[in-house]
């Protein structure tokens, strides 16, 4: 049987089986900027929890059948458990961004600043170089004050590789979440200042369950969030903050052997703090100490210099 034709507003007949633009449009729920950020954070937190539990379930089950096994032992950056949790968090981040983009609104994953636009490789290389420079500045300050001692490390080649993969996943997840979705959506609704402060605060709170977290760690991570926000605002891409995040963690842990946000230290060197914890950061790592200001200050100056260089008119051939 032929379909009946009905006139459209323009007078052109269309069949009942022909999808109209309204039918083809994706159904989205309307929320304000603040509501979108809250919903995104809740979705992300639920997915991270579910995927994380699924990732460590085999280890927990195995430890239940093996006497004397403590699933919390050796949970350093090179641990397969930490690697699995980092991978599950990255997957949860991608899914949360896709769900928001598909059903509620907000930028897509590539739209956050992950397309290889001109200058992206330079940004990534600068970020990879900044981490070791920043941490070296911190280490020199501690050495000059006599508040740290250095010895040989214990990490193996496989540990260096596993740690690199783990910290790459961590950098991707936390930057796509904080400097990606949260900062960029807030900036569109409330401006850059509010977006930077809120995203940095949320970034700091994400580490609240790390061992040794306290008020000094909260302040240090907030400053780190401000620095990473500067890295995004200067380049308007995520390559620089992601590479800087990766190189900072990798320099701090696998290279110099210092605790990374409370995770056990394992690296080519072993750096043991002996000064006041409020300065050195104690067992949490430099992020929880006043000494982190030296590294963050250096990083902020170098990123600002990069921004000025990029704003200069390029000579024409």
Image (tube, rainbow, N blue to C red):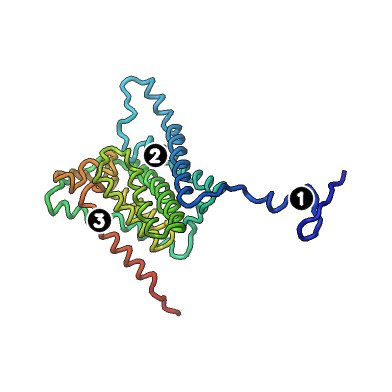
Residue with the most extreme left position: 146
How far is the residue under mark 1 from the one under mark 3?
Answer: 62 Å
Observer-nearest residue: 13 or 74?
13
Question: x and y percent of residue 103 in the render?
Answer: 57, 46
Q: How many marks?
A: 3
State which quarter of the image contains the N terminus: top right
Q: Residues within 10 Å of mark 1 (few under 14, many from 20)?
A: few
Pointer 2 and pointer 3: residues touching (CB < 8 Å)?
no
Observer-nearest residue: 47 or 7?
7
Q: Which residue is drawn at 87% across and 46% down?
A: 2
State which quarter of the image contains the C terminus: bottom left
How far is the residue under mark 2 from the one under mark 3?
Answer: 27 Å
How far is the residue under mark 2 from the one under mark 1?
Answer: 49 Å
First in sequence: mark 2 vs mark 1: 1
Assign a secondary structure to mark 2.
Answer: helix
Is residue 270 left or right of 42 when viewed as pictured? left
* Badge nearest the viewer, 2 or 1: 1
Q: How crowded is mark 2: few (under 14 residues within 10 Å), some or many (20 or more)?
A: many
First in sequence: mark 2 vs mark 3: 2
Q: Mark 1 points at which residue?
A: 18
Question: x and y percent of residue 185 in the render?
Answer: 46, 54
Q: Residue at x 43, y 29 (%)?
A: 57
Question: x and y percent of residue 11 in the render?
Answer: 80, 59
* Badge nearest the viewer, 2 or 3: 3
Assign a secondary structure to mark 1.
Answer: loop
Q: Residues within 10 Å of mark 3 (few under 14, many from 20)?
A: many
Q: Mark 2 points at which residue?
A: 83
| Numbered tag placed on residue 77 in the rendering | none
Q: Which residue is drawn at 41% across and 75% down?
A: 314
| Numbered tag placed on residue 295 in the rendering | 3
Question: x and y percent of residue 214 in the render?
Answer: 25, 41
Q: Residue at x 21, y 48 (%)?
A: 289
């Amino acid at each position: 049987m032929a379909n009946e034709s009905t006139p459209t507003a323009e007078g052109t007949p269309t069949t009942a089986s022909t999808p109209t633009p309204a039918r083809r449009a994706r159904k989205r729920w309307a929320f304000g900027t603040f509501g979108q950020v809250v919903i995104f954070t809740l979705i992300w937190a639920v997915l991270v929890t579910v995927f994380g539990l699924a990732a460590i379930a085999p280890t927990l089950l195995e430890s239940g059948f093996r006497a004397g096994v403590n699933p919390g032992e050796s949970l350093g950056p090179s641990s397969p458990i930490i690697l699995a949790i980092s991978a599950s968090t990255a997957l949860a981040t991608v899914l949360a961004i896709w769900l928001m983009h598909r059903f509620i609104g907000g930028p897509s994953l590539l739209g956050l600043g992950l397309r290889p636009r001109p200058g992206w490789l330079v940004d990534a290389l600068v970020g990879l170089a900044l981490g070791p420079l920043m941490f070296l500045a911190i280490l020199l300050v501690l050495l000059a004050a006599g508040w740290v001692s250095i010895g040989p490390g214990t990490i193996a080649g496989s540990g260096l590789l596993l740690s690199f993969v783990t910290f790459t996943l961590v950098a991707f997840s936390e930057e796509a979440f904080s400097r990606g979705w949260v900062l960029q959506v807030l900036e569109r609704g409330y401006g850059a200042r509010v977006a930077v402060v809120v995203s940095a605060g949320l970034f700091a709170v994400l580490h609240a369950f790390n061992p040794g977290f306290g008020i000094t760690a909260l302040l240090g991570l907030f400053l780190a969030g401000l620095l990473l926000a500067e890295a995004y605002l200067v380049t308007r891409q995520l390559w620089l903050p992601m590479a800087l995040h990766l190189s900072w963690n990798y320099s701090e842990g696998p290279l110099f052997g210092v605790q990374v946000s409370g995770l056990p230290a394992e690296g080519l060197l072993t750096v043991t703090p002996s000064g006041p914890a409020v300065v050195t950061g104690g067992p949490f790592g430099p992020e929880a100490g006043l000494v982190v200001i030296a590294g963050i200050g250096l990083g902020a100056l170098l990123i600002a210099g990069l921004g000025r260089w990029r704003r200069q008119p390029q000579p024409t051939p």
